[in-house]
Image: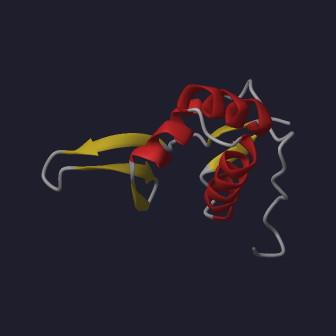
Amino acid sequence: MTADAPVISGSSVVKLARGVRLHEDPVRGQTVLLAPERAIAVDDIAVAIVQALDGERNLDRIAADFAEQFDAPVDEIAEDVRTFVQELSVRRMLEIVQ
């Protein structure tokens, strides 16, 4: 984590930054997260996380919803969600709402 990256916690509420969007790349047969001047290939789990970043629910709520949906341990899901969101934050692909 870089010094200027915001700290992401379970209480963080985030959404994609302006100009960042999911895009299905039919040539490569994969989904990418597009931002001005950059792109990241994402898997199905990352797509689900990105789609859940609605700027209204905090990360703990998103993790709890996933845990219920997939019948999985909430602690593991919460850690995975926070780690992925922190990476997006470092890449300046998120806006922190609160």
Q: Give the x, y percent position of residue 67.
A: 64, 34
- Name which quarter of the figure residue 68 lies in: top right
Residue 53 seen in this snapshot: no
Vertical order, 49 against 83 (above or below)? above
Q: Quadrant of the N terminus?
A: bottom right
Q: Nearer the viewer, residue 40 or 45?
A: 45
79 relative position to 27: left or right: right
Q: Front-most of 51 and 92?
A: 51
**Residue found at the very far bottom of the displayed protein:** 2
Q: Residue at x 76, y 30 (%)?
A: 61
Which residue is depicted at the point 54% across and 33% down?
70
For the image, the number of numbered tags is 0
Query: Where in the figure is residue 84, as x and y percent of width and height?
Result: 62, 56
**Residue at 43% across, 50% down:** 33
Q: From the viewer's perspective, is residue 38 above or below residue 21?
A: below
* 55 lies left or right of 49: right
The image position of residue 75, as x and y in percent, is: 75, 48
With respect to residue 22, does 38 lie above or below?
below
Identify whether 38 is placed above or below 96. Answer: below
Pick the residue in front: 79 or 90. Answer: 79
Residue 5 shows in the view = yes
Q: Quadrant of the image for the C terminus?
A: top right
Residue 74, percent from left and from top:
72, 41
Identify the colour scheme used: secondary structure
Residue shown at 49% from the left, 37% from the top = 48
Q: Residue furthest left?
A: 27
